[in-house]
DNA sequence: TAGATTGTTAATCGATTAACAATC
DNA sequence: TAGATTGTTAATCGATTAACAATC
């Protein structure tokens, strides 16, 4: 697989981003955010979008957006903007996330159910292929098309479905032990919705969802 | 209200951060994240924490953390670390978020119920004081101690309870119209859990929760 | 004392912004 | 043509990091 992107249209090699090198953390984070807006814009039937519109929705400066994108090719049309559809494809190529990724969900409570039935992950190519719970009452129930399974089966499913991402919608008290089982089973990315501080080996990434933190941050700028 | 912080212990004025000035965006964002970890560490009975431990949990470089904190005062003890309890207080002072803030929640479905019953907001001083839904079937039901009210009452509650923050756990299709009503009623911060792109006046802040974006970002570094 | 960790410096790198020519 | 918006430059600012003396 090559890192070269956007060399199809005009063959101009990007000046800033060198093929074969990882993106800087900030660039990857911003590209992901552009993608979210683009996918939603596409859903709403929008065909083109300007860097200014992207800036309004992402709170990233419009010059920064144009700069980020122009590092990979000339995707825009002057006086018009960017084609939504093709920019989605380009960014997905850049982020190597064009394919589908299977994820496993833990916890079939309110939060787990909300996650499994929303299309927030599906829209970005993540497919929830299994839902687990420890509660025998819940095992066997259906959430959408999925039957809730008991945690004891997690290893089999993770192997079979080639799962590297697990989403934790379980109580804080259960999260660390579950995380350890998941690491053992080969999961590489844990998306933690509990507020537990998870300890995992360095090769595993934990992302802890923190709505309250985002809110504190927004509130600071309102208060000052 | 003064911006001066940390002048109690040793009276040394901070060298980098000037009182009366807003924090840089990045500093405010990082302080919020430190706070999240500190609050959870406190819950777990931890009395002190080192910049390295904070770095492990927040993925922020430990030097950066010491630098951020030392801009406001000498909060740490060499060879020991930072006192968790007092650092929580200091950061709250810096962010002006020592008080309680009332929030209103919209949507009494699975997601809304999960939010209302978790303590993820409560731990950071946010109190859900009202839950709304448009579904007459749900109005009158109880979620924890709160009775679900109909959206038509939102204006009264927002006025009475002095609410500036609204959390939207409603379907995407309903989000824009609701956002407009909230802006009209005086809400200043909208925390959007739907994937709708909300358009609001410039004085209102929208934060759209984007778990899939975070996941894409984590996956990029796993794949490369 | 020995070990650990802070607070701070200095050097580098990436982000941000204004400005504007190019061009659709 | 006129208006809009990209792509790019240059200048500034903030973030990041290594290194280490200070000190608990």
Image: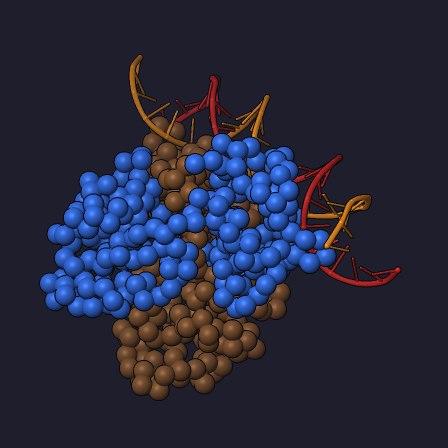
Chain colours: A brown, B blue, C red, D orange
Task: Pick the quarter of the image with the N terminus of chain B.
Answer: top left
Query: What percent of the width, then of the height, locates residue B197?
Result: 29, 46
Compared across the picture, whether B5 is left or right of B158 comes to right
Which of the two residues, A195 or A153, is positioned nearer the viewer here? A195
Quarter of the view holding residue A54: top left
Compared across the picture, whether B40 is left or right of B123 comes to right
Farthest left residue in view: B136
Query: What percent of the width, then of the height, locates residue B5?
Result: 54, 41
Which of the two residues, A195 or A95, is positioned nearer the viewer here? A195
- Residue beneath the point at 36% across and 83% down: A135
Which of the two residues, B176 or A216, is positioned nearer the viewer here? A216
Quarter of the view holding residue B145: bottom left
Residue A108 visible? The answer is yes
- Residue beneath the point at 39% across and 61% down: B120
Task: Pick the quarter of the image with the C terminus of chain B.
Answer: bottom right
Compared across the picture, whether B162 is left or right of B4 comes to left
- Residue beneath the point at 23% across and 57% down: B130
Query: What percent of the width, then of the height, locates residue A164?
Result: 50, 69
Which of the two residues, B130 or B203, is positioned nearer the viewer here? B130
Residue B216 visible? The answer is no
Query: What percent of the width, then of the height, locates residue D8?
Result: 53, 28
Q: Give above or below for B39 relative to A43.
A: below
- Residue beneath the point at 37% across and 60% down: B122
């Amino acid at each position: 697989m090559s890192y070269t992107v956007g060399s199809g249209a005009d063959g101009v090699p990007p000046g800033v981003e060198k093929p074969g090198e990882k993106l800087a953390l900030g660039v990857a984070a911003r590209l992901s955010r552009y993608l979210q807006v683009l996918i939603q814009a596409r859903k709403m039937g929008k065909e083109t979008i300007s860097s200014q519109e992207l800036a309004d929705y992402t709170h990233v400066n419009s010059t920064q957006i144009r700069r980020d994108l122009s590092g990979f090719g000339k995707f825009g049309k002057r006086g018009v903007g960017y084609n939504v559809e093709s920019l989605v494809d380009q960014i997905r190529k850049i982020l190597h996330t064009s394919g589908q990724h299977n994820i496993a969900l833990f916890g079939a409570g309110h939060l787990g159910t909300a996650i499994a039935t929303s299309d927030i992950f599906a829209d970005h190519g993540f497919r929830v292929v299994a839902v687990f719970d420890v509660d025998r009452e819940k095992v066997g129930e259906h959430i959408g098309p999925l039957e809730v399974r008991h945690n004891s089966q997690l290893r089999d499913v993770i192997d079979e479905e080639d799962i590297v991402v697990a989403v934790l919608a379980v109580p804080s008290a259960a999260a660390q032990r579950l995380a350890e089982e998941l690491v053992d089973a080969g999961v590489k990315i844990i998306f933690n919705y509990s507020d537990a501080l998870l300890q995992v080996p360095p090769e595993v990434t934990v992302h802890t969802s923190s709505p309250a933190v985002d809110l504190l941050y927004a509130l600071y700028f309102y208060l000052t």
